[in-house]
Image (cartoon, rainbow, N blue to C red):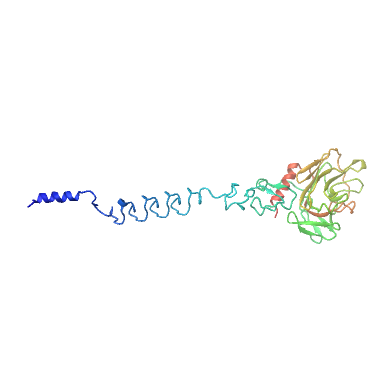
Amino acid sequence: MPSRSMLFLLMLSLALLPGCPTTDDDDSAANDDDATSDDDDATSDDDDATGDDDDATGDDDDATGDDDDSAGDDDDSAGDDDDSAPVDGDGDGSPEGEDCDDNDATSYPGAIEECGSGVDEDCDPSTNCDDTCLPRFDFATSCNLPAPALSPVVHWDYESETAGVISDSGTSSTSGTWTGTPAHTPGFWGNGATFDGTNWILAGAALTLPTDTFTFVTWVKADIVSDNNSELHFLMSSGNGSPGYTGAGIFLTDGEDTRGLLEAQNSAWESLPTGPTICDSKWTQVALVFDQGTANIYVDGAVATSTTPFTDVVWGARPFGVANDPNNLGRFFVGEMDESKVYGSALSANDVDTMRAWELCNRP
Protein backbone atom coordinates (compact mmCIF):
# COMPACT_ATOMS: atom_id res chain seq x y z
CA MET A 1 0.00 0.00 0.00
CA PRO A 2 1.53 3.35 -1.04
CA SER A 3 2.61 5.58 1.73
CA ARG A 4 1.05 8.97 2.37
CA SER A 5 4.12 10.69 0.98
CA MET A 6 3.87 8.84 -2.30
CA LEU A 7 0.18 9.73 -2.69
CA PHE A 8 1.01 13.42 -2.13
CA LEU A 9 3.70 13.40 -4.82
CA LEU A 10 1.35 11.66 -7.27
CA MET A 11 -1.38 14.29 -6.79
CA LEU A 12 1.15 17.12 -7.14
CA SER A 13 2.49 15.78 -10.44
CA LEU A 14 -1.03 15.45 -11.89
CA ALA A 15 -1.76 19.03 -11.01
CA LEU A 16 1.30 20.23 -12.89
CA LEU A 17 0.54 18.42 -16.16
CA PRO A 18 0.22 20.91 -19.22
CA GLY A 19 -3.23 21.79 -20.71
CA CYS A 20 -5.06 21.90 -17.49
CA PRO A 21 -6.42 25.42 -16.86
CA THR A 22 -6.07 26.80 -13.44
CA THR A 23 -9.32 28.82 -13.81
CA ASP A 24 -11.90 30.13 -16.39
CA ASP A 25 -11.75 33.74 -15.18
CA ASP A 26 -8.73 35.92 -14.63
CA ASP A 27 -9.30 38.25 -11.73
CA SER A 28 -11.50 39.20 -8.88
CA ALA A 29 -14.18 40.71 -11.13
CA ALA A 30 -15.19 37.20 -12.14
CA ASN A 31 -16.73 38.53 -15.35
CA ASP A 32 -13.91 38.70 -17.86
CA ASP A 33 -11.27 36.41 -19.29
CA ASP A 34 -7.92 37.79 -20.43
CA ALA A 35 -6.63 34.38 -21.45
CA THR A 36 -9.10 34.05 -24.33
CA SER A 37 -8.68 37.74 -25.35
CA ASP A 38 -12.37 38.25 -25.94
CA ASP A 39 -12.77 40.51 -22.92
CA ASP A 40 -10.00 42.43 -21.29
CA ASP A 41 -10.77 44.03 -17.98
CA ALA A 42 -13.10 44.57 -15.14
CA THR A 43 -15.57 46.74 -17.08
CA SER A 44 -16.60 43.86 -19.30
CA ASP A 45 -17.74 46.22 -22.06
CA ASP A 46 -14.74 46.59 -24.35
CA ASP A 47 -12.01 44.49 -25.92
CA ASP A 48 -8.68 46.09 -26.79
CA ALA A 49 -7.13 42.81 -27.89
CA THR A 50 -9.28 42.48 -31.01
CA GLY A 51 -9.15 46.17 -31.91
CA ASP A 52 -12.86 46.64 -32.41
CA ASP A 53 -13.29 48.79 -29.32
CA ASP A 54 -10.58 50.78 -27.65
CA ASP A 55 -11.21 51.89 -24.15
CA ALA A 56 -13.43 51.89 -21.13
CA THR A 57 -16.11 54.11 -22.68
CA GLY A 58 -17.11 51.43 -25.10
CA ASP A 59 -18.42 53.89 -27.69
CA ASP A 60 -15.50 54.54 -30.04
CA ASP A 61 -12.69 52.73 -31.77
CA ASP A 62 -9.41 54.46 -32.60
CA ALA A 63 -7.71 51.29 -33.78
CA THR A 64 -9.89 50.88 -36.84
CA GLY A 65 -10.03 54.58 -37.72
CA ASP A 66 -13.79 54.79 -38.05
CA ASP A 67 -14.26 56.81 -34.89
CA ASP A 68 -11.64 58.93 -33.25
CA ASP A 69 -12.22 59.83 -29.65
CA SER A 70 -14.38 59.44 -26.63
CA ALA A 71 -17.14 61.59 -28.13
CA GLY A 72 -17.96 58.72 -30.41
CA ASP A 73 -19.40 61.02 -33.09
CA ASP A 74 -16.61 62.04 -35.44
CA ASP A 75 -13.70 60.61 -37.34
CA ASP A 76 -10.60 62.71 -37.93
CA SER A 77 -8.52 59.92 -39.46
CA ALA A 78 -11.09 58.92 -42.08
CA GLY A 79 -11.82 62.51 -43.08
CA ASP A 80 -15.56 62.10 -43.33
CA ASP A 81 -16.22 63.92 -40.09
CA ASP A 82 -13.47 66.20 -38.87
CA ASP A 83 -13.73 68.62 -35.99
CA SER A 84 -10.20 69.97 -36.49
CA ALA A 85 -10.68 70.83 -40.20
CA PRO A 86 -14.28 71.92 -40.98
CA VAL A 87 -15.63 71.26 -44.45
CA ASP A 88 -14.88 73.98 -47.08
CA GLY A 89 -16.69 72.75 -50.15
CA ASP A 90 -15.62 75.51 -52.56
CA GLY A 91 -12.07 76.00 -51.23
CA ASP A 92 -12.45 79.75 -50.63
CA GLY A 93 -11.11 79.57 -47.06
CA SER A 94 -14.49 79.95 -45.37
CA PRO A 95 -15.93 76.72 -43.93
CA GLU A 96 -19.46 75.51 -44.31
CA GLY A 97 -21.61 77.27 -41.75
CA GLU A 98 -19.71 80.56 -42.12
CA ASP A 99 -19.81 80.73 -45.92
CA CYS A 100 -23.14 81.92 -47.32
CA ASP A 101 -22.63 79.76 -50.43
CA ASP A 102 -20.16 76.91 -50.02
CA ASN A 103 -20.52 76.04 -53.69
CA ASP A 104 -19.32 79.45 -54.91
CA ALA A 105 -15.66 80.35 -54.31
CA THR A 106 -16.34 84.05 -55.06
CA SER A 107 -18.79 84.39 -52.14
CA TYR A 108 -17.42 84.41 -48.60
CA PRO A 109 -17.32 86.79 -45.61
CA GLY A 110 -15.12 89.77 -46.45
CA ALA A 111 -15.17 89.29 -50.24
CA ILE A 112 -15.24 92.36 -52.49
CA GLU A 113 -18.76 93.13 -53.69
CA GLU A 114 -19.21 93.12 -57.45
CA CYS A 115 -21.74 95.90 -57.91
CA GLY A 116 -24.65 94.97 -60.15
CA SER A 117 -24.00 91.23 -60.01
CA GLY A 118 -27.10 90.49 -57.93
CA VAL A 119 -24.92 88.19 -55.76
CA ASP A 120 -24.13 88.80 -52.09
CA GLU A 121 -20.38 88.21 -52.46
CA ASP A 122 -19.41 89.27 -48.92
CA CYS A 123 -22.22 87.29 -47.25
CA ASP A 124 -23.65 90.42 -45.63
CA PRO A 125 -27.13 91.48 -46.84
CA SER A 126 -26.66 94.93 -45.28
CA THR A 127 -23.79 95.77 -47.66
CA ASN A 128 -24.98 96.34 -51.20
CA CYS A 129 -23.78 98.45 -54.10
CA ASP A 130 -25.95 96.98 -56.86
CA ASP A 131 -27.84 100.27 -57.24
CA THR A 132 -24.66 102.31 -57.84
CA CYS A 133 -22.45 102.89 -60.86
CA LEU A 134 -19.38 101.50 -59.07
CA PRO A 135 -17.91 98.37 -60.66
CA ARG A 136 -16.99 96.89 -57.26
CA PHE A 137 -16.61 97.96 -53.65
CA ASP A 138 -14.57 96.55 -50.77
CA PHE A 139 -16.85 96.97 -47.76
CA ALA A 140 -14.51 95.02 -45.46
CA THR A 141 -11.67 97.52 -45.98
CA SER A 142 -13.42 100.77 -46.84
CA CYS A 143 -15.93 100.64 -44.01
CA ASN A 144 -13.18 100.79 -41.40
CA LEU A 145 -12.48 104.40 -42.37
CA PRO A 146 -13.60 107.15 -39.97
CA ALA A 147 -16.33 109.59 -40.88
CA PRO A 148 -14.94 112.52 -42.89
CA ALA A 149 -14.28 115.57 -40.73
CA LEU A 150 -15.87 118.02 -43.17
CA SER A 151 -18.35 120.82 -42.52
CA PRO A 152 -20.56 121.73 -45.48
CA VAL A 153 -21.98 125.20 -45.89
CA VAL A 154 -25.16 123.57 -47.23
CA HIS A 155 -26.40 120.00 -46.79
CA TRP A 156 -29.80 119.15 -48.24
CA ASP A 157 -30.65 115.50 -47.53
CA TYR A 158 -34.22 115.56 -48.97
CA GLU A 159 -35.61 113.36 -46.20
CA SER A 160 -38.77 115.45 -45.95
CA GLU A 161 -40.17 118.95 -46.19
CA THR A 162 -42.61 121.07 -44.25
CA ALA A 163 -45.08 123.02 -46.36
CA GLY A 164 -42.77 122.68 -49.32
CA VAL A 165 -39.65 123.84 -47.46
CA ILE A 166 -36.63 121.59 -46.85
CA SER A 167 -34.26 122.25 -43.98
CA ASP A 168 -30.47 122.53 -44.13
CA SER A 169 -28.07 120.73 -41.78
CA GLY A 170 -25.09 122.74 -43.06
CA THR A 171 -23.42 125.63 -41.27
CA SER A 172 -25.37 128.30 -43.16
CA SER A 173 -28.84 126.94 -42.33
CA THR A 174 -29.96 127.72 -45.88
CA SER A 175 -33.42 126.24 -46.36
CA GLY A 176 -34.84 125.50 -49.79
CA THR A 177 -38.35 125.89 -51.22
CA TRP A 178 -39.84 123.50 -53.75
CA THR A 179 -41.16 124.91 -57.01
CA GLY A 180 -43.81 122.54 -58.32
CA THR A 181 -44.88 119.39 -56.52
CA PRO A 182 -42.41 118.04 -53.92
CA ALA A 183 -41.41 114.45 -54.58
CA HIS A 184 -39.56 112.56 -51.86
CA THR A 185 -38.81 109.01 -52.95
CA PRO A 186 -36.42 106.30 -51.76
CA GLY A 187 -32.97 107.67 -52.55
CA PHE A 188 -29.35 106.81 -52.09
CA TRP A 189 -29.48 107.55 -48.35
CA GLY A 190 -32.96 107.21 -46.92
CA ASN A 191 -35.22 109.46 -48.96
CA GLY A 192 -34.07 111.45 -51.95
CA ALA A 193 -35.75 113.92 -54.31
CA THR A 194 -37.22 113.12 -57.73
CA PHE A 195 -37.41 115.84 -60.37
CA ASP A 196 -39.48 115.63 -63.56
CA GLY A 197 -38.74 118.96 -65.23
CA THR A 198 -41.63 120.76 -63.54
CA ASN A 199 -40.21 120.83 -60.03
CA TRP A 200 -36.94 122.02 -58.49
CA ILE A 201 -35.67 123.61 -55.26
CA LEU A 202 -34.35 127.14 -54.74
CA ALA A 203 -32.88 128.88 -51.70
CA GLY A 204 -33.83 132.42 -50.82
CA ALA A 205 -30.48 133.88 -51.87
CA ALA A 206 -27.05 133.14 -53.26
CA LEU A 207 -24.57 131.42 -50.96
CA THR A 208 -21.67 133.27 -49.41
CA LEU A 209 -18.67 131.37 -50.73
CA PRO A 210 -14.99 132.15 -51.35
CA THR A 211 -14.20 133.20 -54.89
CA ASP A 212 -11.20 130.92 -55.28
CA THR A 213 -12.07 127.65 -53.47
CA PHE A 214 -15.37 125.78 -53.20
CA THR A 215 -16.95 122.37 -53.84
CA PHE A 216 -20.34 121.19 -55.09
CA VAL A 217 -21.07 117.47 -54.53
CA THR A 218 -24.22 115.35 -54.86
CA TRP A 219 -25.51 111.88 -55.62
CA VAL A 220 -27.44 111.70 -58.88
CA LYS A 221 -29.38 109.06 -60.81
CA ALA A 222 -30.72 109.70 -64.30
CA ASP A 223 -31.88 107.91 -67.43
CA ILE A 224 -29.09 108.91 -69.80
CA VAL A 225 -31.02 107.70 -72.87
CA SER A 226 -34.33 109.47 -72.35
CA ASP A 227 -33.54 112.50 -70.18
CA ASN A 228 -31.27 115.57 -70.16
CA ASN A 229 -30.26 115.06 -73.79
CA SER A 230 -29.88 118.72 -74.67
CA GLU A 231 -27.37 121.14 -73.15
CA LEU A 232 -27.30 122.63 -69.68
CA HIS A 233 -29.40 120.51 -67.30
CA PHE A 234 -28.30 121.91 -63.95
CA LEU A 235 -27.71 119.78 -60.89
CA MET A 236 -26.51 122.61 -58.61
CA SER A 237 -25.59 126.28 -59.00
CA SER A 238 -25.26 129.47 -57.01
CA GLY A 239 -24.90 133.16 -57.88
CA ASN A 240 -25.38 132.32 -61.54
CA GLY A 241 -26.47 135.66 -63.03
CA SER A 242 -27.51 139.18 -62.02
CA PRO A 243 -25.30 140.63 -63.30
CA GLY A 244 -24.54 138.41 -66.27
CA TYR A 245 -21.67 135.96 -66.53
CA THR A 246 -21.46 135.35 -62.81
CA GLY A 247 -21.61 132.34 -60.51
CA ALA A 248 -20.73 128.66 -60.71
CA GLY A 249 -22.43 125.29 -60.97
CA ILE A 250 -22.40 121.77 -62.30
CA PHE A 251 -24.72 120.33 -64.93
CA LEU A 252 -25.37 117.44 -67.32
CA THR A 253 -25.47 117.63 -71.08
CA ASP A 254 -26.19 115.09 -73.81
CA GLY A 255 -27.68 112.72 -71.24
CA GLU A 256 -24.49 111.54 -69.53
CA ASP A 257 -21.73 114.17 -69.78
CA THR A 258 -20.84 116.18 -66.69
CA ARG A 259 -19.83 119.82 -67.10
CA GLY A 260 -18.85 122.64 -64.81
CA LEU A 261 -19.73 126.33 -65.05
CA LEU A 262 -17.33 129.03 -63.85
CA GLU A 263 -18.03 132.74 -64.47
CA ALA A 264 -16.03 135.91 -63.82
CA GLN A 265 -18.46 138.62 -65.02
CA ASN A 266 -16.98 138.67 -68.49
CA SER A 267 -17.87 136.58 -71.52
CA ALA A 268 -14.17 136.11 -72.14
CA TRP A 269 -13.88 134.60 -68.65
CA GLU A 270 -16.42 131.83 -68.85
CA SER A 271 -15.23 128.25 -68.43
CA LEU A 272 -17.22 125.07 -69.07
CA PRO A 273 -14.86 122.26 -68.04
CA THR A 274 -15.85 118.72 -69.09
CA GLY A 275 -15.94 115.83 -66.62
CA PRO A 276 -16.39 112.05 -66.83
CA THR A 277 -19.72 110.51 -67.83
CA ILE A 278 -22.33 109.09 -65.48
CA CYS A 279 -23.83 105.63 -65.96
CA ASP A 280 -27.45 104.89 -66.75
CA SER A 281 -30.14 104.88 -64.06
CA LYS A 282 -27.92 104.11 -61.06
CA TRP A 283 -26.57 106.26 -58.25
CA THR A 284 -23.40 108.22 -59.03
CA GLN A 285 -21.44 110.65 -56.88
CA VAL A 286 -20.67 113.83 -58.86
CA ALA A 287 -18.46 116.67 -57.58
CA LEU A 288 -17.09 119.96 -58.91
CA VAL A 289 -14.02 121.17 -57.00
CA PHE A 290 -12.57 124.63 -57.74
CA ASP A 291 -9.15 125.33 -56.28
CA GLN A 292 -7.44 128.62 -57.10
CA GLY A 293 -7.98 128.52 -60.83
CA THR A 294 -8.10 124.75 -61.34
CA ALA A 295 -11.38 122.86 -61.80
CA ASN A 296 -11.67 119.14 -61.08
CA ILE A 297 -14.84 117.18 -61.83
CA TYR A 298 -15.18 113.80 -60.11
CA VAL A 299 -17.58 111.01 -61.02
CA ASP A 300 -17.33 108.10 -58.56
CA GLY A 301 -13.68 108.97 -57.97
CA ALA A 302 -12.70 109.25 -61.63
CA VAL A 303 -11.46 112.79 -62.24
CA ALA A 304 -11.15 115.16 -65.15
CA THR A 305 -9.00 118.24 -64.59
CA SER A 306 -9.47 121.41 -66.59
CA THR A 307 -6.31 122.31 -68.47
CA THR A 308 -7.42 125.93 -68.89
CA PRO A 309 -6.44 128.14 -65.94
CA PHE A 310 -9.20 130.35 -64.59
CA THR A 311 -9.35 133.46 -62.49
CA ASP A 312 -11.47 133.82 -59.36
CA VAL A 313 -15.21 133.31 -59.70
CA VAL A 314 -17.45 136.36 -59.39
CA TRP A 315 -20.66 135.55 -57.55
CA GLY A 316 -23.93 137.07 -58.75
CA ALA A 317 -27.20 137.56 -56.88
CA ARG A 318 -29.20 134.59 -58.19
CA PRO A 319 -30.05 132.09 -55.42
CA PHE A 320 -28.55 128.69 -54.82
CA GLY A 321 -30.65 125.93 -56.36
CA VAL A 322 -30.80 122.29 -57.37
CA ALA A 323 -32.35 120.66 -60.43
CA ASN A 324 -32.47 123.92 -62.37
CA ASP A 325 -30.53 127.10 -63.18
CA PRO A 326 -32.03 130.05 -61.26
CA ASN A 327 -30.80 132.31 -64.06
CA ASN A 328 -32.67 130.35 -66.76
CA LEU A 329 -35.43 127.99 -65.59
CA GLY A 330 -35.49 126.17 -68.91
CA ARG A 331 -32.31 124.35 -67.86
CA PHE A 332 -34.07 121.85 -65.60
CA PHE A 333 -32.78 118.42 -64.61
CA VAL A 334 -34.86 115.22 -64.86
CA GLY A 335 -33.90 112.40 -62.51
CA GLU A 336 -33.14 111.84 -58.84
CA MET A 337 -30.75 113.52 -56.41
CA ASP A 338 -29.67 112.89 -52.84
CA GLU A 339 -27.23 114.25 -50.25
CA SER A 340 -26.46 117.54 -52.02
CA LYS A 341 -23.68 119.52 -50.31
CA VAL A 342 -21.69 122.70 -50.84
CA TYR A 343 -18.34 123.41 -49.18
CA GLY A 344 -16.49 126.69 -48.87
CA SER A 345 -13.20 124.91 -49.52
CA ALA A 346 -11.61 122.78 -52.21
CA LEU A 347 -11.97 119.13 -51.17
CA SER A 348 -9.10 116.81 -52.01
CA ALA A 349 -9.51 113.64 -54.04
CA ASN A 350 -9.16 111.70 -50.80
CA ASP A 351 -11.90 113.82 -49.17
CA VAL A 352 -14.28 113.04 -52.04
CA ASP A 353 -13.43 109.32 -51.97
CA THR A 354 -13.75 109.09 -48.17
CA MET A 355 -17.12 110.85 -48.26
CA ARG A 356 -18.41 108.45 -50.91
CA ALA A 357 -17.14 105.37 -49.05
CA TRP A 358 -18.51 106.49 -45.68
CA GLU A 359 -21.95 107.26 -47.14
CA LEU A 360 -22.02 103.93 -48.98
CA CYS A 361 -20.95 102.00 -45.87
CA ASN A 362 -23.44 103.67 -43.54
CA ARG A 363 -26.62 103.86 -45.57
CA PRO A 364 -29.73 103.37 -43.42
Name which residue lies at 77% across and 43% down.
302
User: Would residue 107 be found to the left or right of residue 207 on screen?
Assistant: left
Q: Position of residue 247 (x, y in %)?
A: 87, 46
In this rendered view, identify the residue nearer to me: 360 or 110: 110
Image quarter (top left, top right, bottom left or bottom right) of the C terminus: bottom right
Observer able to see residue 343: no
In this rendered view, identify the residue nearer to me: 21 or 278: 21
Name which residue lies at 55% across and 50% down.
87
From what the image shows, is residue 92 above or below residue 191? Answer: above
User: Would residue 294 be found to the left or right of residue 45 on screen?
Assistant: right
Q: Quadrant of residue 214?
A: top right
User: Would residue 127 be found to the left or right of residue 307 on screen?
Assistant: left
In this rendered view, identify the residue nearer to me: 300 or 146: 300
Q: Position of residue 286 (x, y in %)?
A: 79, 47
Name which residue lies at 74% across and 44% down.
351
Observer able to see residue 275: yes
Q: Position of residue 219 (x, y in %)?
A: 77, 51
User: Would residue 160 be found to the left or right of residue 96 on screen?
Assistant: right
Please count the marks in the image.
Answer: 0
Q: Work out which residue is located at the far left of the displayed protein and give it.
A: 1
Q: Quadrant of residue 261?
A: top right
Q: Position of residue 132 (x, y in %)?
A: 74, 51
